[in-house]
Structure formats: structure tokens, C-alpha cells
Image (cartoon, grey):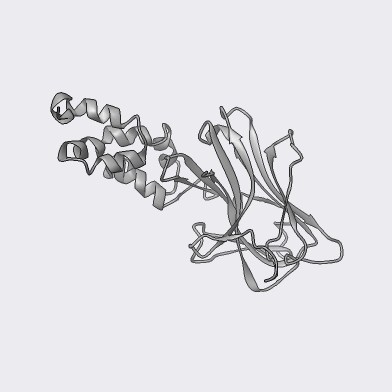
Amino acid sequence: MDITIALPAECISNIISLTTPRDACRLSVVSPVFKSAADSDYVWENFLPSDYKQIISNSVSDSSLITSLSKKDLYFHLCRNPIIINNGTMSFALEPESGKKCYMVGAKGLSIAWGDEPNHWILTSLPESRFPEVAELKYVWWFDVKAMIETKILSLRTNYASYLVFKFVESKYGFERRPVESGVYIEECDNGLRRRLLLDPSRNMARLSQDRGDGWMEIEMGEFFNENGDDGMLVCSLFEFDGFITKHGLIIQGIELRPKSG
């Protein structure tokens, strides 16, 4: 029996809305009836975060996105085009496979030791950055950078990974031999877990950083499982101190949290 005859289109849409964005795209090529159901606003509204209207309304993006695009087009727009929120200090996007939330804390939203001292750090602009300003390290001995984000705004029951998004200027020093310690933990409940990351390893050493394909590198700092969103403030930290070796030449776009695949 042809299911498209036995079931009304609304019922098919309801069934598809209980699957995943990938499944909906696959089902849309089955038949014209399935395409109509799989592309419907009803289906894609269910794939969008429940608070998407509030997030878009509080962004610097045009709030007409909510009304001018179909829900499917809006979904993929948010996957491909992060929007700037929180007065320009963060960005928001969707993970394409699942529709779960991704956030990046930009340079202006980071807590940077000596960040307000132009001799040590400066804010500058780069065309390849999603934010108006990035942080460029001039020189420090004490390297201490933190991003803080409330767990209640993250997707629930999701394993997140934190990434430093960075690059170097041509004249760089201090990161090729001295690893930076990274940690991802709840504020006032530090689990003590740390990773040692070489941001600029020599050619004969393993490279943990990856090219993002957008003009930036990234390196994973740690993981956090967001169960119910009630843990409080999540801290993503980077730290290194050497009283004899200065560090300079690092450019930070931000620290990103996104669902970890696999």
C-alpha cells in the first residue's frame, strides 16, 4: 500500500519531524508528497532550537530572518552563517547534522590577563574574522585566557568540545616548545583535568591543531557533557607561565563550543 495515500500529509510531516535534519533531507527525494511534507515549516520548526526567535531578536542580524525565510532555509542559514549576539561578544550557529547549538566567545568576550594593556595585547580587525575585532598578543610572560558561558544556553544531553580558534603572525615566539595548559570545567568546581597543548609545534612533532578551512586554526581544549543545563557557568581556560621566555605573535578569534561528533 502506498503510504502517501493511506496517511494525510500532516501525519507524514509529524512522523518526519520526529527524525533528524539529515533524515528529512533524504526523505524529501522519495516522492513529491514526501518532499512537501519534509520541507514543511512544521518539520523544520521542530529542528530549530525552541528559543531561536529570542536568539535572533537579540542579535545584530536582521530580525526579518524569522519571517522572510522558510524554516528549512532559516535552519541552513544558521548552519552556514553564524550570527553575532550578546553585543558583539559571541556568535551563535547550528550544527548541521543535529541542529544543536554552537557558540563562540569572541575576543571581546574573553577574560584575558593583561588584555587591557596595549603593550601586551591589542584588539585589531581581520577580514577573515566573524567578529569586528580579534585579540593579538604583543608579548607576555603570563598567558591566561578564559571563556565563560552559561550551561543553560547550551543544548541539553549533549557532549560539547571546546576549541581555541587562532592563528599566528609571521613573527611569533614562545609557543613552539612550551605547551599551554587547557581546562574545561564548571566555575568553583574545577575537576583538575588539564591538557598540554603545543600551539606551534616544530615540523618533527605531532600537530594537534587543525585547519578549519576559514583562514583559522583550531585546537581542542577539552570536553563537557551538558546534561540538564543547570550546572552553572562553564569555564574554558588556557594558561602558561614562564618567567624567562616571553610569548608573542598569537592572534585569537575566540573560543568555540560545539557538539562533538563521534
Of 157 and 61, the residue lying toward us: 157
The quarter in which the N terminus is drawn is top left
Instruction: Please state if 78 lies on the left or on the right of 145 as rendered.
Output: left
* Residue furthest left as drawn: 5
* Residue furthest front as drawn: 1
Say which residue appears at 74% left-offset and 56% top-offset. 180
Specify whether residue 63 is in view.
no
Say which residue appears at 35% left-offset and 29% top-offset. 18
Position of residue 170 relative to residue 225, above or below, is below
* Residue furthest right as drawn: 244
Q: Position of residue 154 (x, y in %)?
A: 53, 36
* Residue furthest bottom as drawn: 170
Q: Position of residue 109 (x, y in %)?
A: 60, 49
Say which residue appears at 48% left-offset and 62% top-offset. 214
Q: Position of residue 244 (x, y in %)?
A: 86, 66
Instruction: Please state if 254 lies on the left or on the right of 43 as rendered.
Output: right
Of 141 and 19, the residue lying toward us: 19
Specify whether residue 121 is in view.
yes
Position of residue 203 relative to residue 117, above or below, is below
Say which residue appears at 15% left-offset and 24% top-offset. 6
Instruction: Please state if 22 lies on the left or on the right of 182 as rendered.
Output: left
Of 134 and 156, the residue lying toward us: 156
Instruction: Tell me which corner region of the image, top left, top right, bottom left or bottom right, holds residue 35.
Output: top left
- Tally of numbered discs: 0
Q: Position of residue 114 (x, y in %)?
A: 74, 56
